[in-house]
Amino acid sequence: MDLIRHLSDYAVPAIFVVILGVAVLKKVKAYDVFVEGAKDGIDTIIKIIPSLVGLLVAVGVFKASGAMDSLILLLRPITDLLGMPPQVAPLALLRPISGSASFAFVTEIIKSFGPDSYAGRVAATMMGSTETIFYTLAVYYGSVGIKNIRYTLIAAIMADIISVIASVWACQFIFG
């Protein structure tokens, strides 16, 4: 364990040394390339800001309007059938929309019920098994200007649903 900790302490400086060493060997002006890459990063950020603002506003309206609470109540028979703790159901709905909101929700579940509780385990497993679909689509497709996402959203939602079910099933199987 100490070996891994020591390796991780020196990993980032070692990567910088390797990058600079390769740049010197290949006679590449590393700083100029870095500045050019930073300019491209700023251009990408400017391109995706409208998509992100729209997504964050939609999440805020969804939560503040009470639509999420109504949807959770509507889905209660299904979540009960799956064996999903009722405290975790909002996470299953939030996770595809917002990573930061879902992270805050998992933190609240773990603070309230503990990391070794069934709800804490399901929430942690679900957090690691699912993805922020809409955020990812907005960032990646928005940065390159793709407007027709074809079947990506449907496939991503199906994968997310399967991941949620698998998270609950795995926790039931492993932790009882």
Image (tube, grey):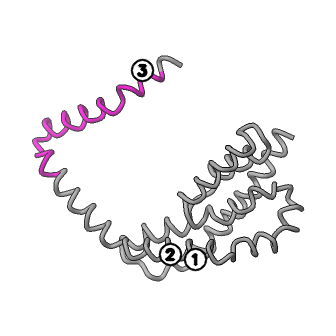
Which quadrant of the view contains residue 63?
A: bottom right
Q: Which residues are magenta?
A: 4-33
Check contact, mark 1 vs mark 2: CB within 8 A: yes
**Residue 36 belongs to the span the image colors magenta:** no
User: Considering only order in the chain, which callout, 1 or 3, is on the residue closer to the N terminus?
Assistant: 3
Instruction: Quadrant for residue 65, please give it.
Output: bottom right
At 29% from the left and 31% from the top, the residue drawn is: 13
- How far apart marks 3 and 1 lie (CA) works out to 46 Å
Q: Check residue 57 in the rendering and tell me which mark sits there, or answer none.
A: 2
Q: Nearer the viewer, mark 2 or mark 3?
A: 2
Residue drawn at 67 percent across, 44 percent down? 111
Residue drawn at point x = 71 percent, y = 39 percent: 115
In this rendering, position of residue 136 left or right of residue 170 = left
The disc at residue 61 is 1
Give the left or right position of residue 157, taking residue 37 as reference: right
Residue type highlighted by circle 1: Val
Residue at the spot of label 3: 6
